């Protein structure tokens, strides 16, 4: 044969081999695939170096364009002597790298499934895999995570981060659309920032309500500190109690929150109707008792701006957060610019109403007289 005839014949034979292997892969006949591949590799004419390289590129392209299991890929590597650790692999290199990444991904997912399906495994990573990969109702999820501790929540976060950033193609195989859905179940302790904010609300409300009666600023500050500290402590303890008590109703709370709160206002399902709604209603009533209608409007308006306007005045450094934990609650990083402007305007409006319209109950609450 002429060189041209030889090239045409070898090319047709290689394509015929490839079509046979592709048909076996489409039929999921992996054992027959390996048998046929071994038979092809043993053909004497394929021992020529150039033809062997061409054949390996065809098989590499076939694996790149089809689906297969990790054991099959390992057997193919053994048949050709491919070894990523030794740097022995076919060209092009980018296609080989994608196959190795896919193999690592499939191995990771298979291992994850084994941990999720084995009910005897109770380690933190096994529980996290079971929570993310197993379809469950909210009640079943709550029953499972009631015993979760810090290790289990860290395992959930690590697994969700791994699937999000390292193996994003696996996200479609997970039972949950949101890989971080478990965050809504994580216990949320009441930190000192809540106490600081409660103290600030009561200090401002009580201060505005008694400022006209105590003109001396020094006396006003001392009385204000004493009067606002007690309700802040009581409110803080009540908030802690309510947080632990409302966790019993976490499942219906999550359902109500998803049904009543628009997704754009609560994209991460952080806000809960029962857990957060009841304390906010109590604070709204407290502001109304201290400063009447304008006080309630001030608190409700500041709360709505905080939910609707996501921009903040600045950022809080980790060093400040660590060194001044008692001041974190009032840091400007938590404030919307519109919120600050609204608060200044409402305080000025309350002071003006107290001065010019003292007889109208806009800034105070009158109990009905008997």
Image (spheres, grey):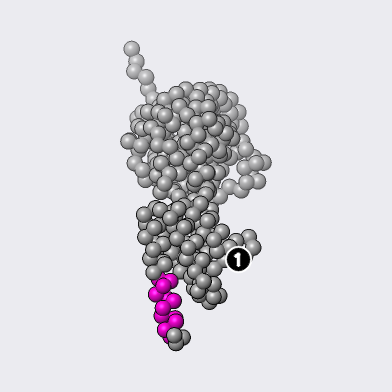
Res 367 quadrant in image: top left
* Secondary structure category for the residue under label 1: loop
Res 143 quadrant in image: top left
Mark 1 burial class by Cα count in 10 Å: few <14, some 14-19, many 20+: few
Residue 238 in picture, x, y percent from top left: 50, 23
320 versus 200 height, above or below: below
Q: Residue at x 40, y 44 (%)?
A: 177
Q: Residue at x 65, y 46 (%)?
A: 319
277 versus 339 height, above or below: above
Q: Quadrant of the N terminus?
A: bottom left
**Label 1, on which residue?**
88
On screen, residue 221 versus residue 305, left or right, reads: right
Q: Which residues are drawn in magenta?
A: 4-15
Residue 9 in picture, x, y percent from top left: 41, 78
Q: Main secondary structure of the magenta part?
A: helix
278 versus 348 height, above or below: above
- Does the magenta segment cover residue 9? yes
Q: Is residue 116 visible?
A: yes
- Does the magenta segment cover residue 113? no
Q: Is residue 343 visible?
A: no
């Amino acid at each position: 044969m002429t060189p041209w005839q030889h090239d045409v014949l070898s090319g047709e034979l290689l394509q015929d081999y490839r079509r046979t292997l592709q048909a076996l892969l489409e039929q999921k006949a992996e054992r027959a695939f390996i048998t046929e591949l071994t038979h092809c590799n043993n053909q004497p004419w394929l021992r020529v170096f150039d033809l062997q390289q061409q054949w390996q590129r065809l098989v590499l392209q076939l694996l790149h364009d089809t689906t297969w299991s990790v054991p099959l890929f390992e057997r193919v590597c053994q048949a050709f002597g491919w070894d990523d650790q030794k740097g022995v692999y076919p060209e092009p290199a980018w296609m080989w790298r994608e196959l190795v990444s896919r193999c690592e991904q499939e191995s990771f997912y298979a291992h994850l499934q084994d941990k999720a399906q084995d009910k005897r495994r109770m380690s933190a990573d096994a529980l996290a895999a079971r929570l993310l990969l197993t379809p469950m109702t909210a009640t079943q999820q709550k029953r499972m995570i009631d015993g979760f501790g810090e290790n289990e929540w860290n395992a959930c976060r690590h697994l969700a981060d791994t699937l999000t950033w390292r193996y994003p193609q696996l996200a479609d195989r997970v039972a949950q659309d949101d890989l971080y859905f478990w965050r809504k179940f994580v216990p949320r302790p009441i930190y000192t920032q809540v106490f600081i904010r409660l103290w600030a609300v009561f200090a401002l409300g009580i201060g505005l309500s008694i400022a006209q009666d105590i003109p001396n600023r020094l006396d006003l500050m001392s009385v204000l500190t004493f009067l606002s500290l007690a309700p802040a402590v009581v409110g803080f303890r009540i908030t802690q109690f309510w947080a632990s008590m409302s966790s019993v109703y976490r499942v219906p709370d999550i359902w109500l929150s998803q049904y009543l709160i628009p997704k754009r206002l609560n994209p991460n399902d952080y806000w809960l109707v029962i857990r957060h709604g009841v304390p906010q209603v109590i604070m709204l009533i407290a502001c109304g008792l201290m400063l009447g209608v304008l006080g309630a409007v001030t608190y409700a308006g500041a709360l709505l701006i905080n939910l609707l306007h996501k921009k903040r005045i600045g950022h809080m450094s980790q060093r400040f957060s660590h060194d001044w934990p008692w001041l974190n609650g009032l840091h400007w990083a938590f404030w919307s610019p519109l919120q600050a402007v609204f608060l200044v305007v409402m305080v000025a409006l309350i002071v003006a109403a107290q001065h010019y319209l003292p007889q109208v109950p806009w800034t105070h609450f009158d109990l009905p007289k008997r």
